[in-house]
Image (tube, rainbow, N blue to C red):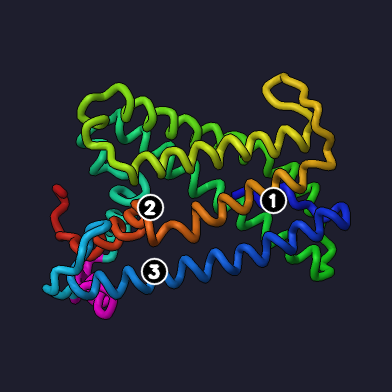
Amino acid sequence: MSMEYFSGISDAMRITFVQVMILSVIAIGIFLYGMYLNIKKWGLGTTGYAQEPSGGGITVFPKTFASQVAKKGDWKLILKTLVLDIILQRRIIRISKFRWFMHIGIFVGWMTLFLLSLLMFLIELLSLSGVNIHPEAIRQMLQPWNDLFSYILLLGIGIAIFRRLFVKRARESTISYDAVLLAGLTFIVITGFVAQGIRLGGFWGLGIEWGVDAAPQMALFHAVISLLFCIAYIPFSKYIHIIATPLTILANIEAEEGE
């Protein structure tokens, strides 16, 4: 999701930004409704994706998740688990360094781009509300970081596609949810590069014929599919493991330094 394209330098871009704001509210609403459905399902005893409730009941979440974590007592261990197991994903690196590199590329690339886009979105809101701030200057400052983490995300996606095509075990375990996930992320990254290329008049040393006037429309298209796929779609897809897995890990912390 690349809100940074919507610098308020023209009426057309301001209209586009308002459209993105409206779409963002809709996407967040769909996300929250989907999370409500998942929380309800988890409360009935289902943690796996696309599985029916077992009826066993889970007390860890949603009602007593925080209290269960608090009962562990060792907040240093909780912080350590948060950093090592959730952010740095050490459990995956123990299984496969190649797989870890793929996961960390997608996770870090995706989350950083999301945070940068959110930051730019807030800056645009401040600018539209009359605060003396210059979105274009800030966008230019953040652009190298957007480029860097876009390539990191693209690298992670490339590795994932390679594994699904050429690693027998990964290929045999691939299901439609995996294919949709990779196809969606790939399309979003490509449209992001195209939108930037239109705005700048070219990318990777190649010139393009589209005028800069097409930039808001292409950026809007990129933002729409990003909002729908990377926010609204999360609770209804395999993306949900991004939320469910950290909660499960935190809820099952064992005070063992050797863990």
Residue at the image point whose x is 66% and y is 67% from the top: 22
Query: Distance between the Cα atoms at labels 2 and 1?
Result: 23 Å
For label 2, the residue is: 239
x, y percent for residue 231 = 50, 58
Magenta residues, start to end: 59-74
Query: Distance between the Cα atoms at labels 3 and 1?
Result: 26 Å
Query: Distance between the Cα atoms at labels 2 and 3?
Result: 12 Å
For label 1, the residue is: 220
Q: Indicate whether 6 appears above or below 180.
A: below
- The answer to whether mark 3 and mark 1 are in CB contact below 8 A is no
Per the picture, the main secondary structure of the magenta-coloured stretch is loop
Extreme residue in the bottom direction: 63
Image quadrant assignment for residue 188: top right
- The answer to whether mark 2 and mark 1 are in CB contact below 8 A is no
Q: Which of the marked residues, 2 or 1, is nearer the chain's N terminus?
A: 1
Q: Judging from the image, what secondary structure is the residue with disc 1 in?
A: helix
Residue at the image point whose x is 80% and y is 32% from the top: 210
Task: Give the amino acid at mark 2.
Answer: Tyr
Q: Residues within 10 Å of mark 2 (few under 14, many from 20)?
A: some
Task: Give the amino acid at mark 3.
Answer: Met
x, y percent for residue 54 = 14, 69
